[in-house]
Image: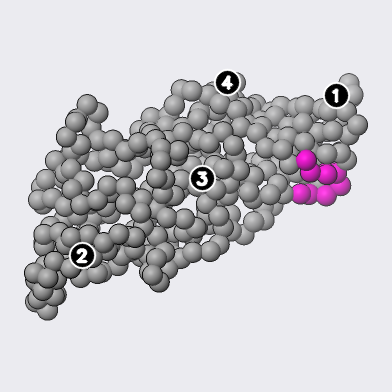
Amino acid sequence: MLFCLGISACESNDVSQQTTGKTNVPLAFKVNFDGTWTENSRGGMGSRGTPTNSLQDFFALYASYYETDGEATQTMNFMQNEKAGSYENEIRTINTFTPPPIHKPMHIYAYYPYEESTAVVRHIEFTEGNTSYQGVPYFSFTLNDKVKEQVDLMVADTIASTNDVLLRNHIPLRFVHLLTAVRFVVDASVPEGTLKTIAINNVANGGTYAYSTRTWQTVNTTMNNYQIEPNLVVGGERKEIAADSTFMMMPQAMGDDANIEVTINNGFDHTVKASLAGRTWQGGKVVTYNIKINKLESGKYGMSLTVKVSDWEDVAKAHYTF
């Protein structure tokens, strides 16, 4: 990561004047999603129950300025869990702040969407057992049991300069998707009936993300089941499950008990399963399963899945072919 502490003489004068005046200032940003920069991005897809490539909600910020070689002892001395988003025609913090000292590096940490409570991001912590809250933060995350209320969890972090704050420069923030979006398509070959439920069973329910490595540091050993109820009439044509029923799942390597379970009714309920054992979900990817159900000679039903893995920006196209 590159950052620059040098500024021109003209900029130095501006910094000095703003510092002397002690005028409270916000932090302003330009936000990046998959390579596209925007100064003010709202609209597009929602942030709960569906993937997003835009800001539909506020994001949270932590920030610390420190001596050049002192990041290991930073204490989030500038802001903690501050709210930012599209506000007053720019992407900025809602609150304003006393100007920081000039010519200091500042590390900014963000997560999206913002949570005032511990409903989604359970907590921000620093080095375990370190009561002075020094170092680089990490947080624990647990998936919402209700699929339509699950969030498209994103994070960003960057090193800027305190001068960027004083000069009201728009600081670049590149958000990355941490979860795996899992979607479903019903194949045209599926017998006529009603697709009642789709469940993903025995998968990890969350983990701990570390900003220091920009990775999931740990994956929970607690397994959970997640289910939607499309109640979708099927048979004879290909159908996509609605985007607001996208499963936002924890990236993980699946165990022996992980499976996808589907219930279809054509006068009677038929429940079929397909194993996910040995499969892996990667963060920032969209995994789309094509469901094929056929009647076996025994009179029972069987299911097979084909899968397509896409980059996140493909979600906006909302069409998947197999």
Residue 300 badge: 1
Q: Are marks 2 and 4 in contact (CB under 8 Å)?
A: no
Marked residue nearer the N-terminal end (3 or 4): 3
> Which residue is painted at 58% across and 54% down in the image?
315
> Which residue is painted at 32% across and 52% down in the image?
82
Residue occupied by mark 4: 256
Residue 86 in sight from this viewpoint: yes
- Is residue 309 left or right of 59 when viewed as pictured? right
Q: In the picture, residue 9 is in which quadrant?
A: bottom left
> Which residue is painted at 32% across and 38% down in the image?
124
Question: Magenta segment, which residues?
Answer: 231-239
Q: Please tell me which residue lies in front, 148 or 97.
A: 97
Q: Is 236 contained in the magenta span?
A: yes
Please name which of the two marks, 3 or 4, marks the residue nearer to the observer. Answer: 3
Place of residue 322 in the rendered image (x, y in percent of width and height, measured from the top left): 70, 48
Residue occupied by mark 2: 24
> Which residue is painted at 45% across and 39% down in the image?
120
